[in-house]
Amino acid sequence: MVSAVFHSPSEPATPAATHVDRPAANEAAMPAETPKPAVKTAAYDWRALALRVLPPVLSIALLVGLWAIATMKGGSFPTPAATFDAAVQLFSDPFYRNGPNDQGIGWNILNSLARVGVGFGLAALVGIPLGFLIGRFEFANRMVSPLIALLKPVSPLAWLPIGLLVFKSANPAAIWTIFICSIWPMVVNTAVGVQRVPQDYLNVARVLKLSEWKVITRILLPAVLPYVLTGVRLSVGTAWLVIVAAEMLTGGVGIGFWVWDEWNNLNVAHILIAIFVIGTVGLLLEWALISLAKHFTFEED
């Protein structure tokens, strides 16, 4: 191919026509290129979107429709339209302050979330290590399991007077109630997760003569993490459920106290708004923990 382009000076020059005709002949001999298939863009799955969006929208529409039908004839129960107007007015200024016991719904929600965060955090600091201890050592399991079986079924509000007696204050008593009611799911789920770790993993750790700290951090913790996160999800839901009832009894600033105060004012529309707000906050907490669990759970698609 190189000699077809560059010629030695001693060789006679080849006619130009020869050089022009040869590539043409080569092109004719080459097979025609097959056309590349067009790249098809994936169509958006509208059906999957409809299956995710339509059912909750229809359920909410059905609830509002039944509510509107039930309140058509009037009465003390507000209509959906009246409740919506009250919600617009309420959320137009959710962070006002007119005194220690007259604050906007935003402050009440934040105060309740702060109590839940402290009580739940203390429960996690105690419950998760206790679950590892129970699941890892048979003696600890036999010693603590009867206490858990005895105390777990007790109603959370039964612990509130004990907190008031010990702490002499409403706020620590509410935090104590959240702590004692949210610790059990984390203890039980963590212990079950540790007990379900394959024995082969522990045998390998024994052969390698790993310390107990390395067994917990390198073997048990990665295997038990999904169980721990499940316990955390259950505990947060329980804590948010209990704080409303605890604040109704203790008073102060919080969504539970706000509901009770609105009942004393016979403002049923605000009570309905508080119910939707409590449910929405609980749903957001659940979604946040589900997203967190997905980042630490490794499953094949």
Image: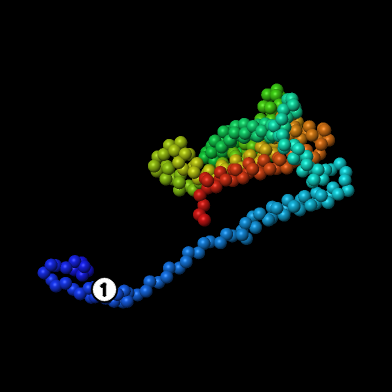
Q: Quadrant of residue 129?
A: top right
Residue type at the position of mark 1: Val
**Is residue 146 in view?**
no
Horizontal side of residue 79 vs 245, given as left or right: right
- Residue labelled with disc 1: 20
How is this picture coloured? Answer: rainbow
Q: Nearer the viewer, residue 139 or 156?
A: 156
Q: Nearer the viewer, residue 11 or 295?
A: 11
Q: Quadrant of residue 139?
A: top right
Bin the neighbour count of mark 1 within 10 Å (Cα to Cα): few under 14, some 14-19, many 20 and up. few
Question: Residue 10, how many percent across, how many down?
Answer: 11, 69
When the figure is inspected, residue 256 is found, relative to residue 63, above or below; the finding is: above
Residue at left offset 79%, top offset 52%:
65
Residue at left offset 76%, top offset 38%:
89
Q: Quadrant of residue 252?
A: top right
Residue at the front extreme, as displayed? 16
Residue at left offset 19%, top offset 66%:
6
Question: Residue 184, how many percent across, how many down?
Answer: 63, 38
**Is residue 92 in view?**
yes
Question: Where does the N terminus fall, quadrant-wise?
Answer: bottom left
Number of dots carrying numbers = 1
Q: Nearer the viewer, residue 142 or 232?
A: 232
